[in-house]
Image (tube, rainbow, N blue to C red):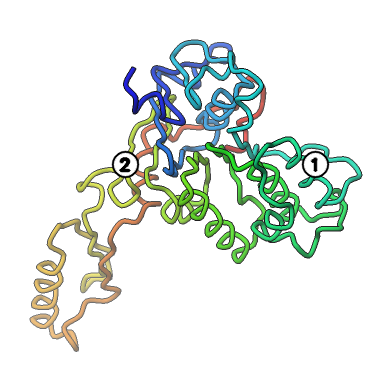
């Protein structure tokens, strides 16, 4: 094992997991470096939360090698958890305590915790510091989950659909916070259904479909050059919708202009002329299309919304 591998916060090879007769993970490889943000994308039931659970050490892989912060999560000592922050998709029962009390309590479990008020401000809960957790809105409870996940200054932060229930302003505040954490060297692995979130935050994205990571690259390069060929669309003289893909869309537009002028169309522009360059969402949908048949939930029922 090289020194680089030893210091890699996440390193997974050949990971497999089966529920009954369905293989949810069919041999995935995954690595996340210090300070890197990795977004794991995939349709509902693809196995994203199963992957998070295995990395956290609450689920057992059937086969494969898993190293998180240098050790096997299932054999890790208690001290190992001090370097790990986890924000699961579901909010647990936090009892009759206020937001500040909970953050302060969890912070007391770590040797180098962030100050309580700093954490509350980071997640936008400063005004709710004295509010009991049970009285928070759904979005505020989600922010409290994040607060408890980051209070210990983790070396690795695992986030499962972290901004579900956030309003647009809160999501952008959260993104700024994550960028600050990664700038401090925290490795971040998140699952999300928000493609703009992945495009903004991720250094790399992996698309999990059919039990495998079918593509992995920086967001702007996912799918390769062929997946990002621009599309020119328009309506012809008979009103029919037309489109062409080309790496040189300007040449198509010039040709259409000449044809429109020859046909006597005022201004020389066909109706509804557009040039679209595929965004991350379009590329992602193209990658999962071969496996777009409904994937059933994991046997324990925890993947039905992923």
> Residue extending furthest right?
96
Q: Are marks 1 and 2 in contact (CB under 8 Å)?
A: no
Q: Residue at x 70, y 49 (%)?
A: 142
Viewer-side residue, 168 vs 22:
168
Horizontal arrangement in the rendering, residue 256 relative to residue 1 (left or right): left
The secondary element bearing badge 1 is classed as helix
Horizontal arrangement in the rendering, residue 252 relative to residue 227 (left or right): left
Horizontal arrangement in the rendering, residue 111 relative to residue 42 (left or right): right
User: Which residue corresponds to mark 2?
Assistant: 217
Quarter the N terminus occupies: top left
Q: Residue at x 25, y 69 (%)?
A: 234
User: Which residue corresponds to mark 1?
Assistant: 105
Res 76 → quadrant: top right
x, y (%) of residue 252? 13, 67
Q: Residue at x 81, y 45 (%)?
A: 102
Q: Nearer the viewer, mark 1 or mark 2?
A: 1
Q: Earlier in the sequence, mark 1 or mark 2?
A: 1
- Up/down of 141 relative to 265, above or below: above
Quarter the C terminus occupies: top right
- Up/down of 219 relative to 287, above or below: below
The label on residue 91 is none
């Amino acid at each position: 094992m090289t020194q680089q591998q030893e210091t890699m916060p996440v390193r997974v090879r050949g990971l497999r997991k089966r529920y009954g007769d369905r293989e949810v993970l069919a041999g995935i490889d995954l690595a996340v470096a210090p300070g890197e943000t990795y977004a794991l994308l995939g349709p509902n039931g693809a196995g994203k939360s199963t992957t998070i659970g295995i990395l956290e050490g609450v689920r057992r892989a059937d086969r494969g090698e898993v190293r998180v912060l240098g050790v096997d999560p299932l054999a890790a000592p208690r001290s190992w958890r001090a370097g790990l922050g986890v924000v699961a998709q579901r909010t647990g029962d936090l009892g009759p305590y206020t937001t500040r009390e909970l953050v302060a309590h969890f912070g007391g479990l770590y040797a180098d915790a962030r100050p309580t008020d700093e954490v509350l401000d980071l997640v936008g809960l400063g005004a709710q510091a004295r509010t009991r957790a049970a009285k928070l809105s759904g979005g505020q409870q989600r922010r409290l989950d994040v607060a408890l996940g980051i209070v210990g200054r983790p070396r690795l932060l695992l986030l499962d659909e972290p901004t579900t229930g956030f309003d647009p302003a809160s999501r952008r505040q959260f993104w700024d916070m994550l960028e600050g954490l990664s700038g401090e060297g925290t490795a971040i692995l998140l699952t999300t259904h928000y493609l703009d979130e992945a495009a903004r935050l991720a250094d790399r994205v992996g698309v999990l479909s059919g039990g495998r990571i079918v593509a992995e690259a920086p967001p702007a390069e996912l799918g390769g050059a062929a997946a990002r060929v621009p599309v020119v669309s328009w309506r012809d003289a008979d009103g029919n919708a037309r489109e062409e893909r080309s790496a040189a869309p300007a040449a198509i537009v010039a040709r259409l202009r000449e044809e429109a002028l020859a046909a006597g169309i005022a201004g020389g522009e066909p109706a509804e002329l557009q040039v679209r360059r595929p965004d991350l969402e379009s590329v992602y949908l193209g990658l999962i299309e071969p496996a777009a048949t409904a994937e059933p939930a994991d046997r324990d029922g925890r993947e039905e919304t992923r």
